[in-house]
Image (tube, rainbow, N blue to C red):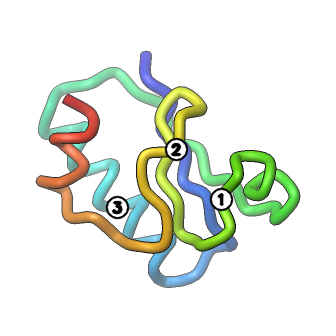
């Protein structure tokens, strides 16, 4: 099971990233857990300085943007 982590304080972009990540994982038929990490210290522990960030299994894939579901599918695939 993949652990998809949304790194952000809960802003509109963070929520959109979460929705896009959920859609991408569902499209791929992945078993996953979506986790929203909102604490700034926890976010910075990933080395992320610009939110929102997307991490999978602890590895940061994107920061500072909201990739489309198609882009996230490519990252997850």
Residue at 69 percent across and 72 percent down: it is 9
22 sits to left or right of 61: left
44 sits to left or right of 12: right
Q: Which mark is residue 19?
A: 3
Dot in front, 1 or 3: 1
Q: Quadrant of the C terminus?
A: top left
The crowd level at tag 2 (other Cα within 10 Å; few <14, some 14-19, many 20+) is some
Dot in front, 3 or 2: 2
First along the sequence among labels 1 and 3: 3
The crowd level at tag 1 (other Cα within 10 Å; few <14, some 14-19, many 20+) is many
Residues tagged 2 and 1 counted as in contact (Cβ below 8 A): yes
x%, y% of residue 21?
33, 51
The crowd level at tag 3 (other Cα within 10 Å; few <14, some 14-19, many 20+) is some
Residue at 70 percent across and 46 percent down: it is 46
Q: State the residue position of label 2.
A: 60
Residue at 62 percent across and 74 percent down: it is 10
74 sits to left or right of 62: left
Q: Which mark is residue 48?
A: 1
x%, y% of residue 68?
20, 64
Q: Report the Cα–Cα distance between label 2 and label 1.
A: 8 Å
Residue at 39 percent across and 65 percent down: it is 17
5 sits to left or right of 30: right
């Amino acid at each position: 099971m993949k652990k998809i982590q949304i790194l952000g304080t809960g802003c509109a972009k963070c929520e959109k990233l979460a929705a896009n990540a959920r859609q991408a994982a569902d499209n791929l038929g992945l078993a996953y857990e979506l986790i929203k990490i909102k604490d700034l210290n926890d976010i910075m522990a990933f080395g992320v300085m610009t939110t929102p960030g997307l991490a999978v299994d602890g590895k940061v894939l994107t920061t500072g943007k909201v990739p489309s579901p198609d882009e996230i599918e490519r990252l997850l695939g």
